[in-house]
Amino acid sequence: MKKLTGKTEIEDALKRLDKLTNEEVRMVTAQVLKATRTVDDGVVRIDNRVADVSERVTRVDDRVARVDEGVTRIEQGVARIDGREAGIDDRVAHVDERVAGVEERVASVDDKVKAIDDKVVVGIDGAQPSLISHRETV
């Protein structure tokens, strides 16, 4: 290294040192700005992704709400069906009672038909000898 002898040489050396220091500061500042831009771009991309995820979550929430409404309507329908089923059960019980009454009447009619049948058989049995004699005469 060269020995500095005069005031001008020292001032020149300080000016060169100052110039180098300023240039170094500019280079460091440029690198910091580049890194900051990279981070900012990354943050913007992350913000966009978060916004996209948030939008998707909102859509899912809307779908879940619609499903909940559908389930509520189905539950209400099932409750109405349960009420109708109870009414049908009552009607079926009433029909069963009426069928039992019809069965009793049919059994009564069967008994009467059998009694008439028995009388007809007795009448036919009693009439046959006279028919036989009537045929003989003819």
Image: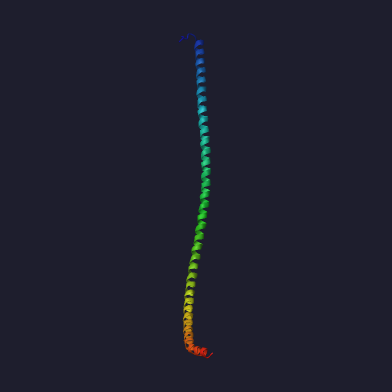
Q: Position of residue 4 (x, y in %)?
A: 47, 9
Q: Position of residue 63 (x, y in %)?
A: 52, 49
Closer to the camera, 58 or 40?
A: 58
Residue 136: horizontal and vertical position, in percent? 51, 89
Q: Residue at x 51, y 57 (%)?
A: 74
The residue that appears at 51% across and 12% down in the rendered structure is 12
Towards the viewer: 59 or 77: 77
Which color scheme does this rendered protein use?
Answer: rainbow
In the image, residue 99 sits, relative to residue 25, either above or below, namely: below
Q: Is residue 79 above or below residue 68?
A: below
Where is residue 8? Give x, y as percent: 51, 10
Query: In which quadrant is the N terminus drawn?
Result: top left
The quarter in which the C terminus is drawn is: bottom right
In this figure, what is the number of numbered marks? 0
Q: Residue at x 51, y 47 (%)?
A: 60
The residue positioned 49% from the left and 65% from the top of the image is 85
78 relative to 112, above or below: above
